[in-house]
Image (spheres, grey):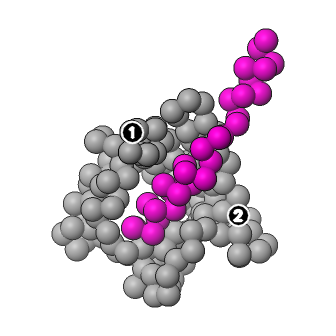
Amino acid sequence: EAQSAKASVGAAPDREAILATVDAFFLALAAGDADTIEGLAGDRTLSVAIRADATTPPRYGDLSELVARIRGGAAAKVVEPYWSPTVMQRAGLAIVWAPYEVSAGGKLIHCGIDQFTLSRHADGWKIDAVAYTAEPDACGELRPADRSAMRPEFPEGAGQ
């Protein structure tokens, strides 16, 4: 019995809806669309930044800080494609784990791993937490051989 329970943990019947939420987040980030980001996030969405330098402690915040920076014009519009997402779901809880790269104004900033925790609500999947590594030297290791594997598809001029 333990085996069958374990096998069902990794199944993600709502995979496409879950990834659509993550895609919408990154498209809104590139567009500087604070309202969409706010609508995709729960009331107290946690953000955790992990630097490549093992001596730097994690930085904690929440997405309301990002929304406020966007509304105040203090947040750069960034393009952050990801690829090869691992999606795990159990009932109304999901996790997305994926390598990514981020650039602003066409200039690469860093690569790393994004990890989203989402919960299902009456109006769809919402982001409850975002954690990521920021690894400037890991792009060569993490980037896919085929860039067409990256998602979401950003419109021309995104992040400008």
In the image, is residue 7 part of the stretch drawn in magenta?
yes
Q: Amino acid at mark 2?
A: Leu
Q: Residue at x 45, y 69 (%)?
A: 27
Q: Residues within 10 Å of mark 1 (few under 14, many from 20)?
A: few
- Return the residue found at the far left: 72
Instruction: Name the spot of residue 154 as percent of width and height, x first.
Output: 52, 77
Q: Main secondary structure of the magenta part?
A: helix
Q: Amino acid at mark 1?
A: Ala
Q: Is residue 133 visible?
A: no
> Would you name the residue on which mark 2 appears?
142
- Residue 158 has which mark? none
Q: Residue at x 60, y 44 (%)?
A: 14
Magenta-colored span:
1-29
Instruction: Name the spot of residue 63 as percent of width and height, x first.
Output: 33, 52
Instruction: Name the spot of residue 54 as percent of width and height, x first.
Output: 56, 48
**Disc 1, SS:** loop
Q: Relative to 37, say whether 121 is above or below.
A: above
> Would you name the residue on which mark 1 appears?
122
Instruction: Name the spot of residue 104 as percent of width and height, x first.
Output: 45, 78
In the picture, the quarter occupied by the C terminus is: bottom left
In the picture, the quarter occupied by the N terminus is: top right
**Disc 2, SS:** helix
In the image, is residue 75 part of the stretch drawn in magenta?
no
- Return the residue found at the far top: 1
Q: Nearer the viewer, residue 23 or 14?
A: 14
Left or right of 127, for residue 13? right
Q: Relative to 27, say whether 2 is above or below.
A: above
Q: CA distance from mark 1 to mark 2?
A: 35 Å
Pointer 1 or 2: first along the chain: 1
- Return the residue found at the far front: 122
Instruction: Mark 1 vs mark 2: give the one in front.
Output: 1
Q: Is residue 141 visible?
A: yes
